[in-house]
Image (spheres, helix red, strand yellow):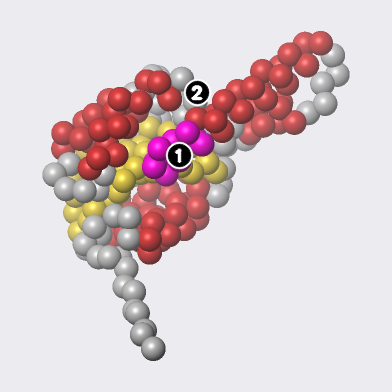
Amino acid sequence: MIVREYQEAQDQQVLFLLDSGYRLHRSEEGERTHGGRMQFDSALEAVLLLSWVSLKHGDSVAVGSFGPARRWLGPRKGLSAFPQLMNGLYDLTSGPYPSSPFSALEEALLRLKRRTFIILISNFREEDGKSLSWILKRLEKRHLLLMVSLREKESESLASRCPAGGEEALETAAAFSYLAARRELYASWEHSGLLTLETSAAALSAALVNRYLLVKRSGRF
């Protein structure tokens, strides 16, 4: 009888890339809701939580933000580094301005010196499939990438409602088509070897930690 014991790989590197632009600059309750908690706030909290978990597991952590609020915190290791991360990120905010996931990934490629688990948090749409295709092929050769999108409650509500008239029927059809295109994009990324995660803002922290632990156990990075 042969007994094999597995141990999670230590001393890996994790990079968070957080979108501070319009894609996450929306209320958690819906795009047209003003005020309240923003999706970006939940994303930032999730980054901080998983940073702590990653440091506790012996990994080094780097964080970059792109969009109107740009910041780069280089790789650091050990739980003693967590206060530095908090001090470097606590005042980050989002804004209703353009952001470029492509540019963020391009900059990451230039900065990273070793294989890294890159977690990109934004809100991806059908058009991103074409605009990111070139950079994603380059990333796949050296790094492991997780593309994280936050669900859009407003679109989901429109797609699932029973329209009362012609105008509502058009809105419902458009929302259904939009969400279907997003699902197709994520499926194509998964097929090519990328990791994807779509979840609500409220469930993001737990979902990210669970995915990180799953990837660690798989030995993929």
Screen quadrant of the C terminus? bottom left
- Mark 2 falls on what kind of element? loop
Q: Is residue 115 visible?
A: yes
Q: Is residue 124 magenta?
A: no
Q: Find disc 1 in the rendering and name its residue.
A: 191
Name the residue at the left extreme: 113
Name the residue at the bottom extreme: 1
Q: Quadrant of residue 194?
A: top left
Which comes sooner in the sequence, label 1 or label 2? 2
User: The residue under label 2 is which amino acid type?
Assistant: Glu
- Up-down: is 10 above or below 93? below
Q: Where residue 148 sits in the image (x, y, percent)?
A: 44, 40
Which span of residues is magenta-colored?
A: 186-195
Name the residue at the front extreme: 1
User: The residue under label 1 is which amino acid type?
Assistant: His
Q: What residue is at 78 percent from the left and 16 percent from the top?
A: 169
Q: Where residue 21 sits in the image (x, y, percent)?
A: 40, 26
Q: Nearer the viewer, residue 33 or 164?
A: 164
